Image (cartoon, rainbow, N blue to C red):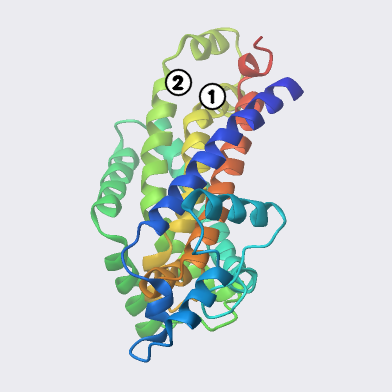
Amino acid sequence: MLWYLGKRLLQLIPVFFGATFLIYLMVFLLPGDPIAALFGDHQPSPQVIEQIRAQYNLDKPFIVQYLLWVGGLFRGDLGQTYSGIPVTEQLAQAFPITARLAILALVFESVAGIVVGVIAGLRKGKVFDATALVVSLFLISIPVFVIGFILQYGLGIELGLFRATVSGQAPWSELVLPAIVLATGSFAYIVRLTRASVAENMSADFVRTATAKGLPRRRVIGVHIFRNSLIPVVTYLGIDIGNLMVGAIVTEGIFNIHGVGGTVYQAVKLGQGPTVVSFVAVMVIIFMLANLLVDLLYAVLDPRIRYAK
């Protein structure tokens, strides 16, 4: 297991440097001068602009800027915005809110999606299965902002079951409805993925063998079918962790949530390169750690991976 973990960690090193390099390059190639845009119509003297550019290392070649930024990232220094605000302060304010939103969405989509998918797979061809397929296709077809506005108006404004907008502190209770909205698409995919995997494993040789040996149906379903059916679902969930963090821009906008998505969106509009690069780099790290966790879960779910040479 340690050898397997070490191998996966080594694979993450080129992924990290490749992803962060591309992110930094994209921000570097954005048109316009961020320092000149900072002052608007009241442009200072060229000497002041050059001094500010030197302060943010914008007068250095691209590769030098990237290496200095990576060095600061390893030291925990994400730099400052062009307005003088430390990026770490922005991250400390926005990241916990988006993390709570993503955790709630992940719990909802994984628990509800797996339960509905397993039942649909065990009852393939019956009413519940057909209903689950129709509802999941319906949720996939509708854009998330439409679902967001419908649930916000119906459950928040009309029925008053949830707050229509989230306060600045964004406690867990106020994030339940936004999390459901954020998770609807992934919930539908997990239902269909789990249903297909369970239905396929129902006719597998190892299930027929376990049934022929006289094992109780509960054990056959809980150990042999369910456990093997989780492998593709775990793969999807590992990828979706990053998608929930990054893809929350629309949901955060609907419910007035001041999280990572809104912060990055505003930073792109204002040309705040340090904020964009640092926030996206943190998302890349979360993506890599999530996929590393998925690889470790593979070894738990499938002993063939654990003991493979």
* Residue matched to label 1: 228
Q: Is residue 133 visible?
A: yes
Callout in the foreground (1, 2): 1
Residue at figure coordinates x 54%, y 55% from the top left = 65
* Residue matched to label 2: 201
Residues 50 and 193: in front is: 50
Q: Is residue 107 above or below residue 210?
A: below
Residue at figure coordinates x 43%, y 88% from the top left = 44
Q: Is residue 1 visible?
A: no
Q: Are marks 1 and 2 in contact (CB under 8 Å)?
A: yes
Picture coordinates of residue 236 (x, y %)? 46, 39
Q: Residues within 10 Å of mark 1 (few under 14, many from 20)?
A: some
Residue at the far bottom: name it: 42
Residue at figure coordinates x 49%, y 74% from the top left = 50
Q: Is residue 98 above or below residue 224?
A: below
Left or right: 84 in relation to 272: right
